[in-house]
Structures are given as C-alpha cells and as structure tokens.
Image: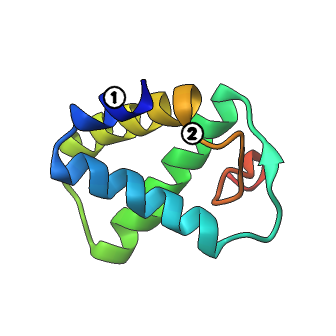
Amino acid sequence: MARRFLQGLSADELQYIAEFLGSCILDHRSQTECTRGQLAQGIAQFERFRRSAAGIRDHCDDDHKMILLLEYLWRYGPTQLSVGVRASQI
C-alpha cells in the first residue's frame, strides 16, 4: 500500500518526503512516538526552517506537500521520529 501511495506522487513530492526523512536522520538526538498532531507540528516546523533557509516566500505548493507528507507518515512511515517533531519546541 505504501508503494502504491508513493507511485502516485510527483518527483517534487517524493523529494519533499525525502528531505523530511533525511532531516530526521540528521537530527537523531531523541526519537519519540508521535501523535498525528505532533507529526503535523513537526512538519510545520520543518517547513518553517526549510523556507527560511532557502528564502522561500510563496508556499502554496508546499502546503500540499505538507499534507501528503503527514498522510504518508501517519499511514506508512516510521512510528518514531526526531526532526523538529518535538512539539514543545514549537
């Protein structure tokens, strides 16, 4: 099922998921079980850092990618993440 989900995504959408998962690997300080709300907050924090680092202002397309990422992680992704999925820091 995860494979079918991913096959329906564009290259940009797949790259966005890869960027998020890569940031989770790089920020491996503490991994915790996440609720759907914590995942959403972590994705939002990731997007804020991503936008500020790249100087991105128009984020309409990224909102769509954030929703796809949340659905992918909630349904098929790892159960523990660490990227800015520490909701207390948001």
Secondary structure, mark 1, is helix
Question: Which one is nearer the viewer's eye here, 49 or 22?
Answer: 22
On the picture, is 5 further left or further right than 73?
A: left
Task: State the separation of the CA atoms marked 1 and 2.
Answer: 12 Å
Q: Which mark is residue 77?
A: 2
On the picture, is 64 further left or further right than 61?
A: right
Q: Where's the N terminus, which quadrant?
A: top left
Q: Which mark is residue 44?
A: none
- Measured from the top left, where is residue 73 in percent x and y? 54, 36
Q: How is the image coloured?
A: rainbow
Q: Residue at x 51, y 58 (%)?
A: 21
- Measured from the top left, where is residue 54 in percent x and y? 29, 74
Q: Decide: marks 1, 2 in contact (CB < 8 A)?
A: no
Task: Give the residue at mark 1.
Answer: 5
Q: Residue at x 54, y 53 (%)?
A: 45
Three-letter amino acid code of the residue under disc 1: Phe
Label 1: few (<14), some (14–19) or many (≥20) C-alpha neighbours in 10 Å: few
- Measured from the top left, where is residue 31 in percent x and y? 80, 56
Q: Residue at x 54, y 67 (%)?
A: 23
Query: Eyeballing the image, is 60 above or below 81?
Result: above
